[in-house]
Amino acid sequence: MKYFDKVLIANRGEIAIRVMRACKELGIESVAIYSSVDKNSLHVKYADEAFLVGEAPPSKSYLNMERIIDIAKKSGVEAIHPGYGFLAENATFAKRCLEEGIVFIGPSWKTIEAMGSKIGAKHMMRNAGVPVLPGTPDGVTSIDDAKKVAAEIGYPVIVKASAGGGGIGMQIVHDEEGLEAALATGMRIAESAFGDPTVFVEKYLIKPRHIEFQVLADRRGHVVHLYDRECSIQRRHQKLVEEAPCPIMTPHLRERMSESAIAVAKACHYANAGTVEFLYSGGNYYFMEMNTRLQVEHTITELVTGIDIVRQQMAIASGEDVAFDQKDISIRGHAIECRINAEDPLHNFAADPGKIVRYRSPGGPGIRVDSGIHMGYTIPTNYDSMISKLCACGATRQETIERMRRAIYEYVILGVKTTLPLHHAIMHNPHFVEGDTHTHFLQEEHVQRNLSRFIREEETRMQTLATSLRQGKEMAAISAAVNVYLQSTK
């Protein structure tokens, strides 16, 4: 079934290609946008049409709402898919699409706006009976009020930006002495990053697990969940490893958490694909936030449920109902995703943009690679450092771990430092193998202890495998032929 004739993808890289793949299968024409540094990127070649949106800085390209709307109108698209990041959770952009008669493939701007405020969202969830962490019910208005609440709920506490995301501006406070400085810093960062200085204080959990539920909802209020994901392994509050389902999930806990996830979606009148995120500690779970967009890690949910989430987004956005009930959805096996970033894990995950001089992606049973890069591609400094999403699936969690180990062994990326050695270390870590993880897992001594050894092993292995890759004029000829083919299919 074809839900639209033509869709613009307001994004870049692997997620733009992911959406275009769904368009290709559905017979929908895809329109790409690209910045000046992305003119030779794979998503530009893959699309049916492509338009320059602006200069490299995101504010002049992928965040340039009016320019994107203008391209959408001139190219005659019916809908815009925002991917994730950039404008995906921007209520103003979703509203502008509505004003211009263009379908925004995501929830309504009112829902995005409501869930974009962490304070407002927590109020809504309390009223819906969903557990939330104790803390200041509203934005902090005075240091005395903040100290009073912190004393009541007990230290440590965390200062968060109400309009924020991605861990930006979060300040962990262990005693009253540090609270005032944390509030001042948090407000300054919130104002700079989000244009809103409002912060709040809530209880900080020492070693919680990050568990989330994927939901689908249509416009008539039918909501289903596609089960759970574990996303606890993070750096700087951003995920590095995800798996589905959560390894500690029990039928009783799943029933409780899924009911809360569906209550969240219904409370904010959600329609499309979204993710409800919880913190779990000591047998209790608490609503953290709702991501009103497609998640990076949607891939592993697709692998264990067999449901194409991007297709579902297209269907719901075109006015279709979710075509199945909860009883029709089940989990088959296990899946793990490793985010492969151009970062140096030994130096605080410093970004390492540059040219990919050797590249070979893994394959074989149970392996999926979502990527927008290739040999000879230069990773720009302007955007996120993610190279690819490496996914493995198997009948059991143990088989999935074994397949991921093998896939990491096969993966060759030379020219930039990557997180591959860290993933290699994680997949062999006995705590991870036992499912014993939490949001501070990467800071644990047992993870850091052997990281240098794993990095040396990975570098040696990749250099060895890289010798099998063709080089010189022959490689240039093959690359040129691929580019000609991609152009001929447009």
Image (spheres, rainbow, N blue to C red):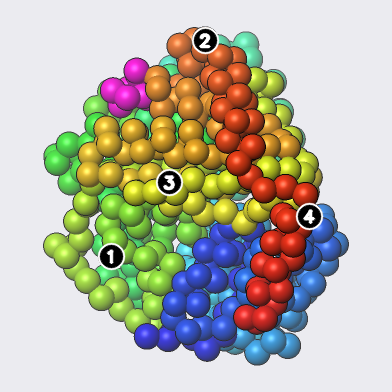
Q: Where residue 444 sits in the image (x, y, percent)?
A: 48, 14
Q: Report the amino acid beneath label 3.
A: Cys
Q: Characterize the local packing of mark 2: few (<14), some (14-19) or many (20 or more) Cα atoms within 10 angstroms.
A: few
Describe residue 293's horizontal placement relative to residue 417 as left or right: left
The numbered mark, 3 or 1, whose residue comes first in the sequence reads 1
Name the quadrant of the N terminus. bottom left
Q: Characterize the local packing of mark 1: few (<14), some (14-19) or many (20 or more) Cα atoms within 10 angstroms.
A: many
The numbered mark, 1 or 2, whose residue comes first in the sequence reads 1
The numbered mark, 3 or 4, whose residue comes first in the sequence reads 3
Task: Name the residue rendered at 34%, 67% in the picture.
Answer: 217
Say which residue label 1 marks. Answer: 223
112 vs 68: above or below: above
> Mark 2 falls on what kind of element?
loop
The numbered mark, 2 or 4, whose residue comes first in the sequence reads 2
> Mark 4 falls on what kind of element?
helix
Give, as a single range, the part of the protein colored magenta. 430-439
Say which residue label 3 marks. Answer: 391
CA gap between label 2 and label 4 equals: 43 Å
